[in-house]
Image: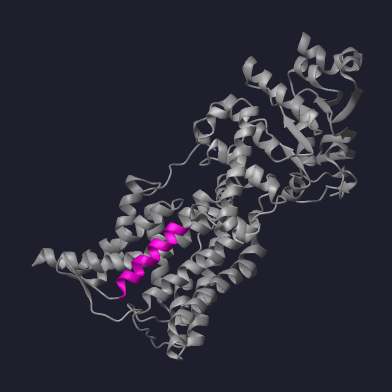
């Protein structure tokens, strides 16, 4: 991690990433950068390689060729948790919950991960002493975590869900919690994989608001989304993939007017 | 009279069950965090009992001997993970289970090498006469055994429910790949699950040593009983391990007392089969959830 660099300077550089599965090229020599404080939309029809690209950036899959760098640090080849430790956080097409934890605990786990330098177990004396014993430092820290978690839940409009166990959440609630949990990590790069799918209009507005807030906080937001209207509305720049290749890059207005894009993607949608 | 002898069997079963519960807690901890059924779990109890008994026999004060015995078990647990489990991290579940069976045999063999075949002995922690409850008799060591269960299970409960490290472990148990994207290092938790499970097993060995003359091969039966107790309670539930331990201990002793001691283990497995047919997730386990 670059010492002393403020979050707003975070620059994610994807350099010539190629991902082959046998004879199939899922991602083909894709290159772009995403800067802190901007929303980079990633568009493309199904099978264009968007999710594979996210898997490569977050360290789940190692690319066949190319690399991913964050502020000059090469993330490629690192384990998933180390990539996360460098500030890359993601959400999934299908929200993934920690069953058995409450909504507040889910957020607190992410908060604690940030607070302890994203290393567990945290310093033994802090992390292992139960708050029930009433040690002053421990109790203050637990309360601070709880308050921060509640503040994040309130900002996402889901403060009332704090005590519910995650098993009981509806789909849209799971999405909002997943987003809140990702923000609790204090990410420098936030990868959102179709965060709007399956949501009602109110929930879509909530998520869009959260995306804008993340941008305002200096986070580099990468947004994969099939809802083209919403994506073009919120993105500062857009990368369009088709069959694993970058077919266009630019600001949303130019992308919407690009005949190559319309042909490959938007046309399908409009027909 | 039949009732009074049954009551006596129940009391004896409670004491044994308390030890089964500690061994079962080790099974549950390791299974929850790593997905491995660690069949070497009973050997940690053997290490604890044999170390405490031999150190005390050499003149070491009991508290120090007990502490070193628990530490010895914890170190053995750590070595099991570092030398045998971690290098095979990519192996399938069945392979890992066979590795633990190998560890079980290896540790028992080491026990034979170090301590020989003769049983050792350890004095009860507090002198005093047997405790009488409604005409039934508990050995003087029984309060120590039960207090150990109370402290261990209360400690585990506080850790998992009231510390954020415990919450993080629960998150890791709920979804390992996703937890790792939250910076939660699964391998560190796997290591600590072996250390803590071994320490708990070792502590169980220390407190049972005055009741059951420890031998190098005591871990085999204790391990099997702990496994049955853990499955009985539900492999994913610590309260289930506690309940399963006591149920198994009591049923074994009552059945053994009324029929013959040869029936004890058979009855344990019979109960296991019945419970798993009627309630496959165990007494307190969660039913399988959507993936």
Q: Residue furthest front?
A: A136
Quarter in which the C terminus of chain B is drawn: top right
Quadrant of the image occupied by residue B49: bottom left
Whether residue B225 appears in this view of the structure is: no
Quarter in which the N terminus of chain B is drawn: bottom left
Quadrant of the image occupied by residue B195: bottom right
Q: Position of residue B130 (x, y in %)?
A: 23, 76
Name the foreground residue: B80 vs A212.
A212
Image vertical order of residue A259 relative to residue B211, above or below: above
Q: Position of residue B230 (x, y in %)?
A: 41, 57
Image vertical order of residue B168 relative to residue A265, above or below: below
Horizontally, residue B168 falls left or right of residue A54, namely left
Tell whether position B83 is magenta.
no
Q: Residue furthest left?
A: B1
Horizontally, residue A258 falls left or right of residue B45, namely right
Name the foreground residue: A241 vs A81.
A81
Horizontally, residue A81 falls left or right of residue B79, namely right
Whether residue B150 appears in this view of the structure is: yes
Name the foreground residue: B291 vs A185.
A185
Report the magenta stretch's main SS: helix
Write down the region rendered in magenta: B141-155
């Amino acid at each position: 991690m670059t010492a002393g660099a403020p979050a707003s300077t975070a620059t994610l550089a994807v350099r010539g990433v190629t991902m082959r599965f046998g004879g199939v090229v899922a991602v083909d020599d894709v290159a772009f950068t995403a800067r802190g404080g901007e929303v980079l939309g990633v568009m493309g029809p199904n099978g264009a390689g968007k999710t594979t690209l996210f898997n490569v950036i977050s360290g789940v899959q190692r690319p066949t060729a190319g690399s991913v760098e964050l502020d000059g640090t090469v993330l490629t080849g690192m384990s998933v948790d180390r990539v996360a430790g460098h500030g890359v956080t993601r959400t999934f097409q299908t929200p993934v919950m920690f069953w058995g934890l409450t909504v507040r605990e889910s957020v607190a786990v992410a908060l604690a991960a940030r607070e302890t330098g994203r290393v567990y177990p945290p310093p033994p004396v802090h992390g292992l002493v139960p708050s029930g014993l009433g040690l002053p430092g421990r109790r203050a820290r637990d309360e601070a975590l709880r308050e921060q978690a509640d503040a994040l839940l309130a900002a996402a409009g889901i403060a009332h869900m704090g005590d519910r166990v995650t098993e009981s959440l509806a789909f849209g609630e799971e999405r909002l919690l997943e987003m809140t949990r990702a923000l609790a990590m204090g990410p420098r790069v936030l990868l959102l994989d179709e965060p709007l799918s399956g949501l009602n209009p109110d929930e879509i507005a909530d998520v869009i608001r959260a995306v804008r807030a993340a941008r305002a906080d200096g986070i580099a937001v990468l947004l994969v989304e099939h809802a083209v209207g919403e994506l073009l509305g919120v993105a500062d720049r857009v990368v369009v993939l088709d069959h694993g290749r970058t077919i266009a890059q630019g600001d949303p207005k130019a992308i919407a007017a690009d005949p190559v894009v319309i042909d490959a993607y938007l046309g399908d949608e409009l027909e | 009279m039949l009732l009074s002898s049954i009551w006596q069997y129940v009391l004896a079963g409670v004491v044994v069950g308390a030890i089964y519960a500690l061994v079962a807690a080790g099974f549950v901890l390791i299974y929850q965090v790593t997905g491995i059924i660690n069949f070497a779990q009973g050997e940690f109890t053997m290490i604890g009992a044999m170390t405490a008994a031999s150190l005390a026999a050499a003149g070491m004060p009991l508290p120090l001997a007990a502490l070193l015995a628990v530490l010895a078990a914890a170190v053995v647990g750590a070595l099991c993970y570092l030398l045998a489990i971690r290098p095979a991290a990519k192996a399938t579940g069945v392979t890992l289970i066979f590795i633990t069976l190998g560890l079980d045999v290896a540790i028992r063999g080491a026990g034979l090498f170090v301590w020989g075949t003769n049983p050792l002995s350890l004095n009860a922690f507090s002198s005093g006469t047997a405790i009488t409850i409604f005409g039934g008799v508990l050995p003087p060591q029984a309060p120590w055994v039960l207090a150990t269960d109370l402290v261990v299970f209360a400690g585990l409960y506080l850790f998992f429910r009231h510390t954020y490290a415990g919450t993080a472990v629960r998150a890791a148990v709920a979804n390992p790949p996703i937890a790792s994207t939250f910076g939660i290092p699964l391998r560190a938790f796997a290591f600590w699950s072996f250390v803590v499970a071994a320490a708990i097993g070792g502590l169980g060995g220390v407190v049972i040593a005055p009741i059951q003359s420890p031998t190098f091969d005591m871990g085999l039966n204790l391990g099997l009983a702990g496994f049955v107790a853990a499955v009985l309670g539900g492999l994913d539930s610590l309260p289930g391990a506690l309940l399963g331990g006591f149920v198994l201990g009591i049923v074994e002793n009552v059945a053994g007392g009324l029929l013959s001691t040869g029936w004890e283990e058979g009855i344990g497995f019979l109960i296991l089969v019945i419970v798993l047919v009627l309630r496959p997730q165990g007494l307190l386990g969660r039913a399988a959830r959507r993936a």
